[in-house]
Image (tube, rainbow, N blue to C red):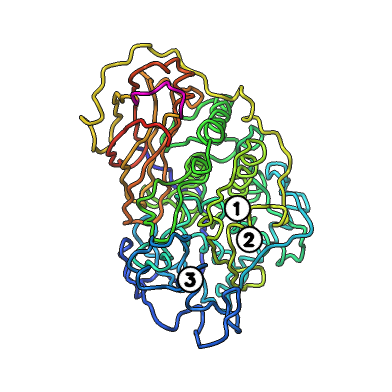
Amino acid sequence: MASFRAMSSATNCIPYSSSFSSKKSSFSNNRRNPVVKVTCKDRIGDHRPETTSKNGENSQGTLDRRDVLLGLGGLYSTSLAANPMALAKPALPDFKDCVEATQSNDVPINCCPPAATRIKDYVPSATTIRTRMDAQSITVDSDYYQKYSAAIQKMRNLSPADPRNFRQQANVHCAYCVGGYTLQGNPQLLYEIHGSWLFFPWHRWYLYFFEKICQNLIDDDTFVLPFWNWDAPGGMQIPPMYNSIVTSPLYDCLRNPDHLPPSVINLEWSDGDPTVPPNDQIKYNLAIMYAQMITQSKTPTDFFGSPYRAGDDITTLDGAGQIEQTPHNNVHSWTGTVVDSSNPINMGALYSAARDPIFFAHHANIDRLWTIWLNQLKGTNFTDPDWLNAYFIFYNEEAKPVRVKIQDCLDTSKLGYTYEDVPIPWLDVSAKSTPRATAKTLPSAPDPSQIFPTTLDNPINVIVERPKNSGSGSSEEILIIEGIEYDKGNYVKFNVYINEDDVNACHPDNTEFLGSFSSLPHGHGMNVRTNKRFRISEVLEELGAQDYDRVLVTLVPKSTPVTINGVRIEFES
């Protein structure tokens, strides 16, 4: 595969730098089995025998040791330590022991936050609701642009020791996603906020406090973040506010130079994809949004991702939700660039993504999709207490650490914001993919058992048997690409087609294109084994193949090769 073109032409491009150290720490750099220092005196505070209040804090405001170890429930018992799933509970970060992480090129990076003491529980209670605006409509001569630029510049000017410093804010994302934290009660397991049901709520809280910090620095509590409306034709370019003035604090020179305006974003982008006419790309993008938000997101697990509980190994879960992989990952990789083929930087890799201010507009749109899925598409949040009671720790606008729960971020009005009401063209059925005129007779191809496990370094065709009771209408059929193995330090992507006899002629607005599996670089040296699920009952009906006993499945690699262990179809349980 071709690599990104480096920013060699940007001779004045100086990436944001600071005095943050990336030298090796005393912690082990074995990411699967990190050696974590555990002491009776941790960095959250000295735990002396003091009276503990009902909210888990002692009289000095620090977390009680029992609460640090177990999060929201009970005492840390020997039996629970031996069997973490004896009592199901939320997956929680061990905030007291942030360890050195690794960049995608296997270089250590220290993105741990400053030491935290007096961590307090936080519940939002906004009295005024502000409207987050479409970034595409904001001009560089507007008052809003001046305010946002001033806020980011003030962030950059803060001391590197201040957790509100722009680089420190970027490091928050780094620490939570590339192995900076381990799982409470299970220091041998790394904690991760991507690839599970934590993805949407963690990023909502992250943007919330980033927004509060901006408000504080410019002394304007009416300020709200913009959203990059890349899911509608008018927003499918990098907004002018992020790209028009190269000396602006909102500009980042480490974006892919081939994708600057007027380039139209590709929501299924893979490195090496050919450029297509803008109108065609817009049509493809709308079909992708319809498929991901409607066809493939019927349940909370489809949309948010798989459950993640205490004792779970994040590297063996069923994995990310539909939206996290596409369009989220692809917007990152389309926007970012690389220094060389093995080192994606800024938006192109999770450890550095939040160093580009456009990250926050991108994720504001991801957050907006959550509200659309609930309101327009009548989706539902999880009601599982292990999701609702999971918590994260952030620094607020006063540079003080706070603990926040997922259950307290579900109502955006209580967080003090809503989203501008803009057209959502992909909601229209006209955005739905349509079948190609493919051959009615399936070509010859081997059975999955004859192929897998194998390395996906060339396109693979397999004929997959459908379950015996297919067509019964009792439940939906799910195509499962199982046992996908790869190194999380690599950019990974492959496309999946069904009953397609010519993948080169098939586009994202064709029903035969099911979608893709993708993973952004983060946590080099961390091996993953996960699955990818596609809903196919509706797809087969549209293809006129609902009575077929077998289907043709084609996997096409678009990145570093991965190992695939099987392909099968099952009825949804």
Q: Position of residue 360 (x, y in %)?
A: 60, 52
Q: Visible in this render: residue 257?
A: no
Q: Main secondary structure of the magenta part?
A: loop
Q: CA distance from mark 1 to mark 3?
A: 37 Å
The front one of 39 and 152 is 39
Q: Residue at x 59, y 50 (%)?
A: 358
10 Å crowding of disc 1: few (<14), some (14-19), many (20+): many
Disc marking residue 76: none
Q: Is residue 443 above or below residue 41?
A: above
Q: Is residue 504 above or below residue 522?
A: above
Between circles 3 and 2, the one closer to the viewer is: 3
Q: Judging from the image, what secondary structure is the residue with disc 3 in?
A: loop
Which quadrant, please, contains the N terminus? top left
Pointer 3: what residue? Answer: 74
Which quadrant, please, contains the C terminus? top left
Q: Earlier in the sequence, mark 1 or mark 3?
A: 3
Q: Earlier in the sequence, mark 1 or mark 2?
A: 2
Give the quarter of the image for residue 472: top left
Q: Judging from the image, what secondary structure is the residue with disc 1 in?
A: helix
10 Å crowding of disc 2: few (<14), some (14-19), many (20+): many
The front one of 97 and 557 is 97
Q: Residue at x 46, y 50 (%)?
A: 307
* Residue 471 drawn in magenta: yes
The front one of 13 and 143 is 143
Residue stretch rendered in magenta on the structure: 467-475
Pointer 2: what residue? Answer: 210
Disc marking residue 360: 1
Instruction: Kindly check if marks 1 and 2 are in contact, taking CB atoms under 8 A apart as contact.
Output: yes
Between circles 1 and 3, the one closer to the viewer is: 3
Give, as a three-letter code, the residue at label 3.
Gly
Q: Visible in this render: residue 361?
A: yes
* Residue 463 drawn in magenta: no
